Image (cartoon, rainbow, N blue to C red):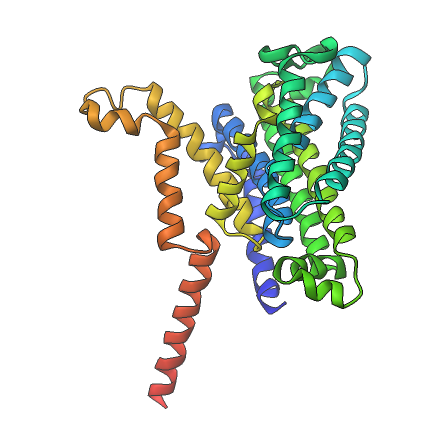
Amino acid sequence: MLRWKYSRPLLAILVALLAIAPIAGVGPLRGAGMQQTFAVAFLYGALALSYDLLFGFTGLLSFGHALFFASGAYITTILINHNNFPLYLAAITAVSISAVLANLVGAASLRTKGITFAMVTLAFGEAGHVIIARNFGGLTNGENGLALNADRVPQFFIGVINTRYLYWLAFLVLIMVYLVVWWVTETSAGRVFAALRDNEVRVSVLGLNPARFKLLSFVIAGTLASICGSAMVLVAGSAAPHMATADVTIALLLMVILGGPTTRWGAVIGGIVYSFLSTRLQDLNQGEVLANVPKIISGPLSEPTFILGLIFIFIVMFAPGGLSGAYYRSRFKYLQRSLNRSNSIR
């Protein structure tokens, strides 16, 4: 509580700076390209936080979380393109349907535990990917993805000059997801989630129903993921089949581990850093920076996944607890040195 008390002013300043950056006319965020990059990064930060609620706070390792991200994106696009839904109504409907889907998938998957649960969620996720990629029902446009009809979207979201509105939308989604996860984890249900992660048997002994609370966490996390998917359609301009793949869920797992689970802000930082690095490393690969570097070196360096993998290995080996864990350890050491110094003076 004390830590949160002193961090609030800094958090408020950071939020204000990020909010006004696109219109300040200074810094990297004055350009549309960087605004787009940060908009995508914000949404992946929010998506990673939704996964952290499931994995970090509740201890459920799911490999199907991307299914709800994709359902939010595709249902929103289908309702706008084929049913002439207004944007806000399409998004609300998509999130509602995704919540029901999360309830059904969670109810079936949570009949199992451990690695079996992970494999069942993987099966559901891959089934969703197959349905999207094979264009069942003729609604998803198969492997080509489904482009959003720009004529049916508010015009302030269209065009390079309006990229700042997409930036603000993504930033708003990130703040909303953060507040929801913060509220959930601070409630009595959130404390039960943490207890389930640490000792499920003890929760049962206390007379609580572990399955009910696991399902609640699963549904909340899936619903938040669908909100990110609905927003991503606007930012990216289309819904793509890869959104439903296990690769996305594994990337989310890496984001959470990179930033540090159970800290909330750690997952957000991990998602933003991972997304930003993925984008910039791809630009590096397409540029001339590595043109004069020997092939034996430029080959691995030209693969973003290779560099991200090295970063992940470094974090796991030398910074357990991720970036947030490293921060808290360094702060503890600083406070300990300060305390020792004050005691020696006395």
Q: Quadrant of the C terminus?
A: bottom left
From where the camera sits, is residue 340 visible?
yes
Q: What residue appears at the point 58 percent right and 44 percent down from the top-left corner?
A: 115
- Tell whether 4 sits left or right of 205: left
Q: Position of residue 48 (x, y in %)?
A: 57, 41
Report the residue at 39% width, 49% height from top: 315
Residue at 74% across / 22% down in the picture?
75
With respect to residue 41, does 180 lie above or below? below
Instruction: Indicate the quadrant where residue 203 lies.
Output: bottom right
Task: Name the image quarter holding the N terminus.
Answer: bottom right
184 lies above or below 18: below
Q: Is residue 6 left or right of residue 138?
A: left
Query: Which sits in the foreground, 30 or 86?
Result: 86
> What residue sits 54% from the left and 39% below the top?
252
In the rendered view, would you say 52 is above or below 34?
below
> Horizontal placement of 284 versus 99: left or right?
left
Where residue 100 sits, quadrant-wise, is top right
x then y, percent, for residue 50: 64, 43
Q: Position of residue 257 (x, y in %)?
A: 49, 47
Q: Residue furthest bottom?
A: 346
Q: How many marks?
A: 0
Q: Residue 68: percent from the left, percent from the top?
A: 68, 32
Query: Which quadrant of the structure image shows residue 136?
Result: top right
> Is residue 64 in view from this perspective?
no
The residue lying toward the viewer, choosing from 285 and 307, is 307
Asked if residue 92 is positioned above or below residue 144 in the image, the reply reads: below
